[in-house]
């Protein structure tokens, strides 16, 4: 999986892979924008350009290439009336509403394929299974049990005592919802080898897994001129899950001269004590940026010691900007140890510090690995590569569904 070869568009017998005639797509995001909104847009581009997009259901539409009549927008959804409840309950309610709308669409019989995301689609997958409609779901991170750290256990929750508490508890997405989705879908899309391993560890059938790494716009994200000093960049939400506290501690230990650390992303409350504890005058907090390429193109190296992801989009973006990376296997498969960067274990502050020091001391290594990183994404991880792989995933799903339904 790690070399990410482009799959063939034909079967082993040389016949073209089958494709849907009318796709129903649903996602708890917007179509067009940043992050997952970009993923949704690029996925729909594949079906729209292929002539088989039926309808996409999402929480808004922020693009103009795909005609609006293909997008069923839930922007003015009724769940807004309970937006005052805590975020897990509100998000759970929004996901279940999306699922309810999608299931009603699939019941019409106008679609012959369903594509959605884990946690967003249980009722719709039940409809797909009942009607014999092939289905594919994407896993944004890892297997639910591995991501929560509660392997094989149901997440504990307090027994609701009042009618209000009972009502709220029904809004949450429990573990069993995710596990049933895994069982119902014909194909599970994983974003990295590490994510696939979390499924294999639970004896999940290999033939039901499909590797689909993300893409990046290599015209938008591209190398800039060398910075005037050594500059390390972190891009992403400043939260502990992404290892920001480990990076700050490593940077504080080094006390490098003529060097800067730029932190590009929203500063969450959990990061503030670490920023205060490990602050140095050469640390700069940028905050959320709609143009991360502006900052990435001014860096020397990229540091992203995440503890778990699906496949972090910021790693693709930094590599496209020609930055060698210090990252983890948990962040995805873009970076190979010793080629495009340095792979460290999550939480290993010593290793993070040693890798930063090594790049600081060896600018020739920065240049060599940075060039390799740019070549890596151009040759393997553009959005064209992504859409080709996605079409192959659709064909694989249809063939798998046909085999499972054969007498």
Image: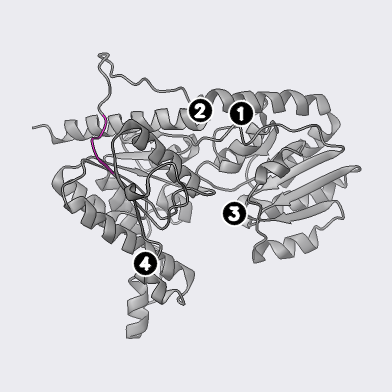
Q: Mark 2 points at which residue?
A: 2
Q: Earlier in the sequence, mark 2 or mark 1?
A: 2
What predominant SS class does the magenta segment belong to? loop
Q: Earlier in the sequence, mark 4 or mark 1?
A: 4
Q: Name the residue under label 4.
A: 77
Mark 3 nearby-residue class (10 Å; few <14, some 14–19, many ≥20): some
The relative height of residue 101 versus residue 400 in the rendered view (above or below) is below
* 20 in the magenta segment: yes
Q: Is label 4 in a helix, a strand or a loop?
A: loop
Q: Give 103 or 353, whichever is nearer the viewer.
A: 103
Q: Is label 3 in a helix, a strand or a loop?
A: helix
Mark 1 nearby-residue class (10 Å; few <14, some 14–19, many ≥20): many
The answer to the question of whether label 2 and label 1 lie on touching residues, with beta carbons closer than 8 A, is yes
Q: In x, y percent, where is residue 66?
A: 40, 42
Q: Give 242 or 117, whichever is nearer the viewer.
A: 117
Q: In x, y percent, where is residue 395?
A: 29, 29
Q: Name the residue under label 3.
A: 241
Mark 2 nearby-residue class (10 Å; few <14, some 14–19, many ≥20): some
Question: How many angstroms separate mark 4 from mark 1 (CA)?
Answer: 43 Å
Q: Which of marks 2 and 4 is nearer the N terminus?
A: 2
Q: Earlier in the sequence, mark 3 or mark 4?
A: 4
The quarter holding residue 171 reads bottom left
Range of residues picked out in magenta: 19-23
Of marks 3 and 4, the one in the foreground = 4
Q: In x, y percent, where is residue 372?
A: 66, 23
Location of the C terminus by quadrant is top left
């Amino acid at each position: 999986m790690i070399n990410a070869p482009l799959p063939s568009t034909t079967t082993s017998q040389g016949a073209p892979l089958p494709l849907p005639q009318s796709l129903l797509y649903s996602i708890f995001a917007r179509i067009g924008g940043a992050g997952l909104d970009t993923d949704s847009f690029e996925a729909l581009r594949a079906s729209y350009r292929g002539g088989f997009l039926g309808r996409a259901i999402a929480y808004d539409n922020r693009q103009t290439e795909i005609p609006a009549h293909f997008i069923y927008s839930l922007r003015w959804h009724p769940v807004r009336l309970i937006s005052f409840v805590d975020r897990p309950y509100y998000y759970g309610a929004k996901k279940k509403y999306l699922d309810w709308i999608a299931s009603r669409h699939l019941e019409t019989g106008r679609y012959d394929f369903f594509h959605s995301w884990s946690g967003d689609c249980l009722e719709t997958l039940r409809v797909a299974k009942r009607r014999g409609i092939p289905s594919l779901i994407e896993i944004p991170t890892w297997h639910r049990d591995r991501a929560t750290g509660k392997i094989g256990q149901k997440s504990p929750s307090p027994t609701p005592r009042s009618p209000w508490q009972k009502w709220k508890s029904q809004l949450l997405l429990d573990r069993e919802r995710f596990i049933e989705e895994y069982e119902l879908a014909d194909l599970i899309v994983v974003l990295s080898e590490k994510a696939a391993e979390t499924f294999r560890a639970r004896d999940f059938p290999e033939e039901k897994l499909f590797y689909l790494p993300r893409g990046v716009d290599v015209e938008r994200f591209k190398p800039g001129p060398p910075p005037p000093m050594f500059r390390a960049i972190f891009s992403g939400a400043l939260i502990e899950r992404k290892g920001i506290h480990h990076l700050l501690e490593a940077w504080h230990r080094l006390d490098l001269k003529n060097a800067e650390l730029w932190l590009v992303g929203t500063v969450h409350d959990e990061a503030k004590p670490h920023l205060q504890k490990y602050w140095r005058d050469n640390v700069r907090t940028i905050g959320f940026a709609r143009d991360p390429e502006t900052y990435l193109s001014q860096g020397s190296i990229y540091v992203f010691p995440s503890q778990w992801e699906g496949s972090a989009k910021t790693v693709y973006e930094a590599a496209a900007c020609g930055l060698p990376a210090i990252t983890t296997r948990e962040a995805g498969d873009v970076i190979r140890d010793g080629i495009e960067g340095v792979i460290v274990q999550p939480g290993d502050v010593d290793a993070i510090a040693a890798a930063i020091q090594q790049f600081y001391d060896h600018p020739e290594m920065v240049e060599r690995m940075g060039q390799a990183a740019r070549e890596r994404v151009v040759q393997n991880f553009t959005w064209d590569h992504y859409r080709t792989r996605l079409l192959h995933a659709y064909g694989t799903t249809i063939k798998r569904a046909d085999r499972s339904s054969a007498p």
